[in-house]
Amino acid sequence: MAYFRKIQAKNKKGYTWSFTLDLGIDPETGKRKQITRRGFDSKKEAELAANQITLDIENKSFVNEKDVHFKDLIQDYLELIAKQSVKPSTFYGYTTVVNKRLIPKFGHIKVKKINPKLISSYYNDLLKEGLTEEYIQYIHAILKTASQTAVDWKYIKNDFMSNVKAPRRKKNEVETWSIEECIKFLKRMKEQQDHIFILYYLAIYTGMRRGELLGLKWGAIDFDKRRIHITHSLYYIAGQGLVLQDPKTASGKRNISITDDVIAELQAYKVKKQEQLLKVGLKLNKDHFIISAFGGEPLNPNTIHKQFLYDIKLAGVKRIRFHDLRHTHATIMLEIGENSKVVSERLGHSNVSITLDKYSHVSSNLQDSSAENFSYALQKTRSQQ
């Protein structure tokens, strides 16, 4: 049964309408169950709302939305769900975004008051601030999971992210070095510390990611079969330090072939590391990290960016990111005619379409040369007949 009443208010009418639904006695608590809603402009509007709630209760689809603030929802989601379901590095990324971006913006707002327009306006503000579409998509993914959690926990009835679209990611041109620039850079790096040279050398010759390179141990190198077994990545997580994690996807765990040149560089480097350790009475073993300033201790991934920028300037080559060494490896392989499937497997992409999409500028150039080769082959055959 519903009870309707007028309530004094500071509007033109001087009042609004409210209603209370009496749902009887709660068998678990022994207390009377009631639902009250306020702020309706007319009695008819209040009646329609009361009828809808009554219908939802009968259909067992009613959710009595809670007065929970976004800050409490997102912190509970991080602690109770994300922490147990994602990798430590991912959880650290989530926590950073939540504390830096989401709580300052939405923390004081009740979850039931958040709507698609509010989120979309926020995305526009972030774009104006200069944030990338990729970063906003990352925020979008966290908000979607948080919203669904609020629905699952019956804080709200409707998912406030269901009609929100993140800005589409722009396709940026891949920055790479030419073969000549790679040679010039590595030649200059030969004069640097051994572990710095081998880091760059492997990055260019294998296309491995920064974390994969830094997480590489001597036991991962099969010198006889000329293979590198990639099974982990190294991350730095605040409060935990350096952490080894499994790859994000199944394709990230892979074996890649290396040439005799790479084998020779690794063996020469290994001898130097063994001599280094022997001086302090230690022996190099398979569990020591390859990229190590001393012995077998790993490098902090966060230090690589500044080191790389310094070394680029030292070598006098075009400025790119460390990750672009990976793009350089892939681009050169495709330009010399390597099969895209092979390149995809070396990079650890989940499917070849990712490779083809990312390096479409290369495949476009290869189409031109392929067309020329095809035409030349037919003309040559015709002339011989």
Image (cartoon, rainbow, N blue to C red):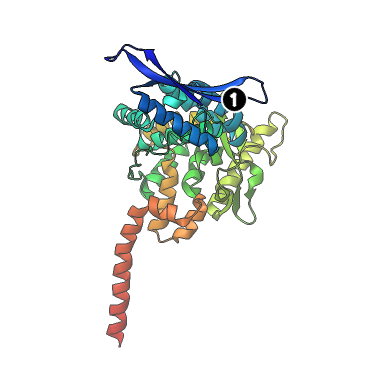
In front of the other: 330 or 74: 74
In front of the other: 164 or 255: 164
Residue at 70% from the left image edge and 39% from the top image edge: 285
Could you tell me which quadrant the C terminus lies in?
bottom left
Give residue 235's quadrant in the image.
top right
In front of the other: 97 or 363: 97
**What percent of the width, then of the height, locates residue 273?**
63, 37
Residue at 43% from the left image edge and 43% from the top image edge: 325
**What percent of the width, then of the height, locates residue 117?**
34, 31
Relative to 153, say whether 372 is above or below. Answer: below
Q: State the residue position of label 1.
A: 24
Whether residue 45 appears in this view of the structure is yes
Give residue 225's quadrant in the image.
bottom right
**What percent of the width, then of the height, locates residue 44?**
36, 27
| Horizontal side, residue 317 vs residue 342: left or right | left
Residue at 59% from the left image edge and 50% from the top image edge: 228
Residue kind at label 1, given as amino acid type: Gly
| Horizontal side, residue 219 vs residue 380: left or right | right
Relative to 275, say whether 174 is above or below. Answer: below
Whether residue 192 appears in this view of the structure is no
